[in-house]
């Protein structure tokens, strides 16, 4: 139980830092860090990104992946932890899936 609470706290910290850094690095782009999912051993943090303009998805994801080492280094300094999870950026398509389910239920 304590391990789960610490993982949730770490995920929240990572989300807050990444949200602030990406807001500075990506002025003029409309996306947000919606959630962080940590692997059980805390070795990987999946960063879920919601992009408001679908036509910018590939560009934003490419730029995020180019900056992943910068964000990892910044997390190392900010969190002052011995091990920092490896960051993986993924598109958050929950809203799209929810809309599909709604359409299916209405049929």
Image (cartoon, rainbow, N blue to C red):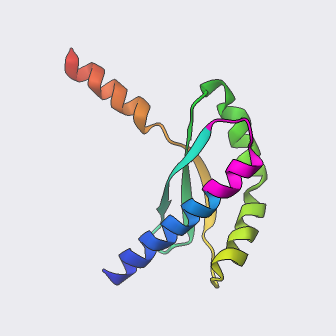
Q: Is residue 77 magenta?
A: no
Q: Where on the picture, by quarter, is residue 45?
A: bottom right
> Looking at the picture, does residue 41 appear above or below residue 71?
below
Q: Provide residue 57's location: percent of width, then percent of height.
A: 65, 33
Q: Where on the picture, by quarter, is residue 99?
A: top left
Q: Is residue 22 magenta?
A: yes
> Looking at the picture, does residue 2 appear above or below residue 17?
below
Image point (57%, 61%), residue name:
16
Q: Provide residue 20's location: percent of width, then percent of height.
A: 65, 56
Location of the C terminus (image quadrant): top left
- The region drawn magenta spans 19-30
Q: Is residue 78 left or right of residue 95?
A: right
Image point (29%, 19%), residue name:
103
> Looking at the picture, does residue 56 appear above or below residue 34?
above
Q: Is residue 63 left or right of residue 38?
A: right
Q: Nearer the viewer, residue 46 or 80?
A: 80
Location of the N terminus (image quadrant): bottom left
Image point (38%, 32%), residue name:
97
Q: Provide residue 79's location: percent of width, then percent of height.
A: 63, 77
Report the residue that reaches farthest toward the top: 107
Q: Provide residue 61's location: percent of width, then percent of height.
A: 68, 41
Q: How many marks?
A: 0
> Looking at the picture, does residue 49 appear above or below residue 58?
below
Image point (75%, 70%), residue name:
73
Q: Where on the picture, by quarter, is residue 6?
A: bottom left
């Amino acid at each position: 139980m304590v391990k789960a609470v610490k993982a949730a706290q770490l995920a929240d910290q990572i989300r807050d830092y990444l949200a602030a850094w990406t807001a500075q690095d990506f002025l003029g782009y409309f996306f947000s860090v919606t959630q962080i999912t940590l692997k059980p051993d805390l070795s990987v943090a999946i960063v879920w990104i919601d992009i408001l303009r679908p036509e910018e998805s590939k560009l934003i994801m490419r730029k995020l992946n180019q900056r992943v080492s910068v964000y990892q280094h910044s997390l190392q300094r900010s969190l002052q932890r011995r091990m920092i999870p490896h960051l993986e950026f993924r598109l958050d398509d929950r809203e799209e899936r929810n809309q599909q389910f709604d359409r299916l239920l209405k049929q």
